[in-house]
Amino acid sequence: MNYQAIPSPSFVLEMARLRKNLELIRSVREQAGVDIILALKGFSMWRVFPIVGQYLSGATASSLDEARLIYDEMGVRAYTYSPAYLPEDFADIMRYSSHITFNSLNQFHRYHEQVQNYPEPISMGLRVNPEYSEVETDLYNPASPVSRLGETAPNLGDRLPEGIEGLHFHTLCESSSYTLEKTLQAFEKRFAKYFPQLKWVNFGGGHLMTRKDYDVDHLVKLLQDFRQRHTLQVILEPGSAIAWETGVLVATVLDIIENHGVKTAILDVSFTAHMPDTLEMPYRPRIVGATDPVDGKPTYRIGGVSCLAGDYMEAYSFEKPLEIGDRMVFEDMIHYTMVKTTTFNGVKHPNICILQEDGELEIVKTFDHQDFKNRLS
């Protein structure tokens, strides 16, 4: 890809890579006999929803806006879950949802009559906490015994309330099939007694089946075995796996400053505004042509353009000194990145682009003052 030909800053989705991921996911779906749906919290680029919809079984939402986006742009009703529903939104959530999962028994009891009386069928589920997770970053771990996300087994008694047709857990984060296997053991140990009441189970997200080292065959067998033990519809809703390694964020060096021997390259993008997971998770983004610090090579901290003091990444080394105007390309920036961007400090939001399979670059969206202003009042 000729990064110099891409306007900076820009997110660039590569359609050929996205389609390759979707083909693998469809293969898992068909071999295992499960439903795999898109999680909008991980990838909400609705411009490609018609293509995504050709490979997946639907999509999952966590809010009214996401559910409506699925309905409008993918043409299906959403699988909807929220930690708590806004009362003023719930009538519209029912309109756009085929499934509604409640985070607590309290929420179920508050809304279940509305769902049962709705003129179109809506399947109701309950989120549960298997109390097992291998996620090491607390910010992303929903399965502690005192988590606010889902009911633990002691809260449920001997039977589920009438009307609950599914159970939903979500404990993974970019995890392997072997972590799912251990999670399923905990899930079945605590909740299998309720399975005769159910029609479906949702294994949530975090199934990173498009990562190169992921054991896809093991995942397929794991899902097949579960379905043989239990006559239930199985749903997976990966976020990262859909758009994993499908695109980049192209930036430009605006300035280079040096204090006490430390050089910092300041870019036209921001870590806090455009790549917040790099500070929250935290993780170190990969940069094309850069490595961890190497003695003797040109080395720079990478600074964002916002005024936040911590808007930077520690040092990277390059083959040659950076110059103002150089392009800098951050890899794997399409999933869980565009959905979290902000216009904090009024920083310019990157363009959203698609590199089509024929090599044509399509600039799908640019951002101007009105986009910034309309978020405020």
Image (cartoon, grey):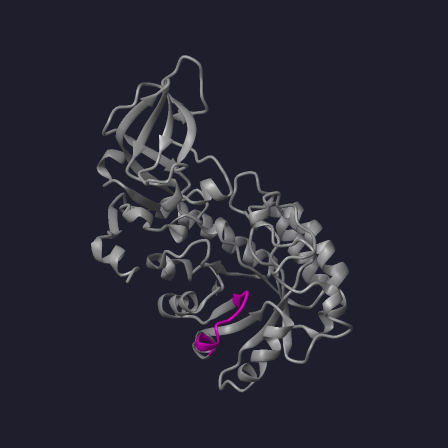
Horizontal relation, residue 228 to residue 142: left or right = right
- Is residue 338 one of those drawn in magenta? no
Instruction: Tell me: residue 73, above or below residue 361.
Output: below
- Whether residue 9 is visible to the viewer of this picture, yes or no, is yes
Judge from the rendering whether residue 225 lies leftward or rightward of residue 377; answer left or right. Answer: right
Looking at this view, is 153 or 218 the one in front? Answer: 153
Most distant residue in the top direction: 296
- Which residue is painted at 51% across and 71% down in the image? 85
| Residue 73 spot, x, y in % from top left | 36, 66
User: Which image quadrant: the C terminus?
Assistant: bottom left
Tally of numbered discs: 0
Query: Residue 127 location in percent, x, y?
Result: 62, 65
Most foreground residue, 166 or 377: 377
Q: Quadrant of residue 113?
A: bottom right
Is residue 262 toward the left or the right of residue 42 in the image? left
In the picture, residue 310 is in which quadrant? top left
* Residue 2 visible (yes or no): no
Quarter the N terminus occupies? top left
Q: Residue at x 56, y 51 (%)?
A: 206
| Whole-percent x, y for residue 163 in the image | 64, 79
What range of the chain is rendered magenta?
Answer: 81-90
Q: Position of residue 92 (x, y in %)?
A: 43, 77
Of 262 and 56, nearer the camera is 262
Question: Which is more toward the observer, 257 or 80?
Answer: 257
| Left or right relative to 212: residue 135 | right
